[in-house]
Structures are given as C-alpha cells and as structure tokens.
Image (cartoon, grey):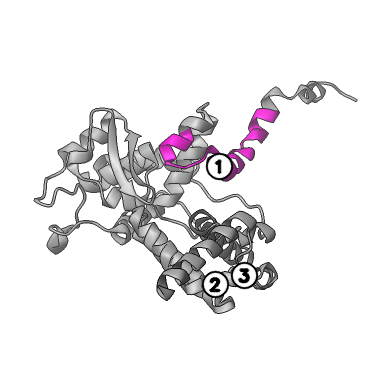
Amino acid sequence: MQLIDTEVKQAIELLIARVLGEVSELHIKTQEIGDSFLADCKDRKLSNKTIEGYIPHIKKLIELSEEFPPEPKVIQGFLTSKGAYNADAHYRTWHCVGNYAKRQYGIPNFMERVIRPRIPKGIMPTLEEEHLKKLAILLKDAPARDKAILCLLIDTAIRSGELANLRFGDIRQDTFFVHGKTGYREVPISSYPRDLLLSLPRNEDGYVFHGTGRYRDYRLDKTGIYKVVRKYLRMVGHTGKQFGAQILRRSFGRWWLLDGGDMKSLSIIYGHSSIVTTDKAYTPLVTRDVANLHHRHSPGGVFENESY
C-alpha cells in the first residue's frame, strides 16, 4: 500500500511539474536524461556517426551538472570558454537534449536561456570551372570505378557515406536511393552517371563500389572514397586543405545556384531538413560571383566610355 501511495505521489509531482514548469524537486539526474536521449536517437534510427558525435557532449553536460536541468549560467560560462565552432557543436547537442526533456518530461528547455555562440562568417572552398573542365577530360581515360565515383559525386552532391552505402538495388531510372546521415532519401541522377554505375562489375554483397587488387571483395569505405577524390583533384591542380567529397558537394550547390537553380530544389537534393540550412550554408558561396554580374549590368559602366 505504501508503495502504491509513493508511486501516486511521484505521478502527481510530475504532473504538477509539467503544468507549472517547476522540476527542481524531482531530482532528475543528467545521466538519466542523457541515457534516455541516446536511446531515443537509436530508436529514431539516427546514424551511428551522429550518435557518436552526441556522446562526448552529453558526457560534458553530466560533468557540468549532475542534476537536471543545469543552471544556464554554468552552460553559458562553459560555452564562452570554448572556440566558436566547438562551442556551437555543444550548444546544438544540448539544445536537442533540452527539447527531448521538454517533450518527454515537461521540463522547460534550459538552453532557451543560453545565448548561442556566434560563428565567424567565412566562405568554404569550392572548385572553379577550370578544375571541372580539366576533371572531365582526365576522367575520359580513368578506370571505370573512379570515373563513376567522381561523376556521381559531381552530378548528385551525395555525401561520401551515402556513396559507400549505395547498392545496385537502389538505382532506378531517373533517381536512386541513398542511406546515410539523414536516413533513406531519393536523389535525382543524370543518365550518364547512372549508366556508369550499372556498367560496374557486381559483387555478391550488392554494393556498387569496392576496393581494387586484393581488396576488390571489400566494400569501399569513406576513407577509400576520400583517397580517390583527392587523387584526381590534385591532378587537376586543386590546392588547399580540403580534397574530399564534401568539396564536390559544396561546388554542386554553387554551380546549381549560379545556373539559375532554385534554393528549395537544392535543399531537397541535399537532403536538408530545412531550407534555412541550405540558404545559410550555400548563399555565401555565390556572393563572390555577384561581382561578375555587377560588372555586366551595373549602370556605372556608362562612365567607362566617357572622358572627364
């Protein structure tokens, strides 16, 4: 009887906390919230990479406060002490945890009282048109597998993990299905890269891309894809610190927008959950190209033919 009374009392306390937002007396441990949040991520079938990225942030949250929710000033102090990109990564994870706790337990999201770190503006590198033209010429005599990898990345802007997981059974007439960071999604594909994919030798495991030589029976992983892309980007004269599939993905967005493609369609192709993500990340890539439009269309050009 006493056990039933205790359970009823706890249920009433939780109900009151949900209504009034007063959760301090419930003494929920941050460890419990963190474990429950990660279990929910697995149930929602988020990628292992995403979940692995959450884990160290949740461990830090537990370290900062054993009781949940933590004091916003403690969180703000920690974020202030970190670099902008590191702090923002923690902020985004903890905001997800706060939303989860609000949804599951009625606890107000503590992160709503924390100021998000400001990320300095910058323009991520992309390939230039001359690199793309050289790459097209170079790939004419490249091995079929390498040609298919580069053409597929340039034509569809998929992630390296999505390319690694591609199976022959995922390929349709004008689209194909990929599985990666955002789960399964359908991506449009042009006829030439599709034909290249279907021309590759088939392995019993069903995957499209494999290693070479003694590794020909092993599925090509993201590291192998990076090495292939890096090899050809170096051969066409690309310099810088980034040589992976991501630079081809960003280049796709820049070329798409410059050629008149709309932001909504680009967002769908990328697999972004919100068009805001696409707009924020890819609009800066075309701002430098606006200078060329300015030179062609600005009325200020009238002064170039006048003598003063």
Please state the horizontal and vertical placement of residue 198, each as a whole percent of the image: 17, 37
Is tag 1's residue or tag 2's residue first in the polypeptide sequence?
A: 2
| Residue extending furthest toward the right | 308
Q: Nearer the viewer, mark 1 or mark 2?
A: 2
Task: Mark 1 and mark 2 in contact? Answer it, CB < 8 Å.
Answer: no
Q: Which residues are magenta?
A: 266-294
Task: Mark 1 and mark 3 in contact? Answer it, CB < 8 Å.
Answer: no
Q: Amino acid at mark 1?
A: Tyr
Figure quadrant of the C terminus: top right
Tell me the tag on residue 24: 3
Q: Is residue 171 shown in magenta?
A: no
Query: What type of secondary structure mainly makes up the magenta span?
Result: helix
Which residue position is annotated with label 2?
61
Q: What is the secondary structure assignment of the residue under circle 2?
A: helix
Q: Is residue 207 left or right of residue 32?
A: left
Can residue 107 be seen by looking at this rendering? Answer: no
Q: What is the secondary structure assignment of the residue under circle 3?
A: helix
Tell me the tag on residue 282: 1
Please state the horizontal and vertical placement of residue 302, each as a whole percent of the image: 79, 21
Q: Is residue 104 left or right of residue 307?
A: left
